[in-house]
Amino acid sequence: MIRVFLFVASLAIATLACSENYSRDPRLVGSWRYVENTESTTEITFRKDGTFFSKVIKDGEKYVEVDGKWLTRDGCLYYIYTKVSPPRVPSGTRDKDTILEIAKDYLVLVTAAHRTKKYVKYQQ
């Protein structure tokens, strides 16, 4: 059942990408890190194939890991979560951030919660 859902979700993203001018901004490809404070760090890797992996570390422990798919359109970054561990949000959840700036070594996003975050590019 989960495989069927993931397949349908993948088709939905592919359909959106083709029918509504979604794309993948190649400047996002790579690994990015946002350090909120000494206790909380977010890392996300955007892959060329449109998948991503993200993890949040809080107090030195894994808080959540997310696998999913990503697309861009009109200055926005769209996500669909295909696997979340532990399941803090359901698989299939969609999210959107606004891209304020993309430079060679940093990325500035405004999250759906209206928080501005500056991610720094790093090598894995």
Image: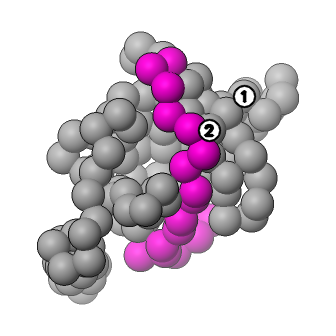
Question: Residue at point 53% right, 68% down?
Answer: 95
* Residue 100 lies within the magenta run: yes
Q: Amino acid at mark 1?
A: Val
* Residue 16 lies within the magenta run: no
User: What quarter of the picture does the N terminus occupy?
Assistant: bottom left
Q: Which residues are magenta?
A: 88-105
Q: Residues within 10 Å of mark 1 (few under 14, many from 20)?
A: some
Tell whether 41 sits left or right of 2: right
Disc tally is: 2
Q: Amino acid at mark 2?
A: Val
**Residue lying furthest front:** 74
Contact between marks 2 and 1 (CB within 8 A): the answer is no
Q: Which mark is residue 108?
A: 2
Q: Position of residue 113 (x, y in %)?
A: 74, 64
Asked if residue 7 can be seen in this view, the reply is no
Q: Which residue is mark 1?
A: 35
Q: Under tag 2, what secondary structure?
A: strand
Of the two numbered discs 2 and 1 in the rendering, the one whose residue sits closer to the viewer = 2
The image shows residue 62, relative to residue 97, as above or below, that is: above
Tell whether 118 sits left or right of 22: right
Q: CA distance from mark 2 to mark 1?
A: 13 Å
Question: Residue at point 25% right, 69% down?
Answer: 21
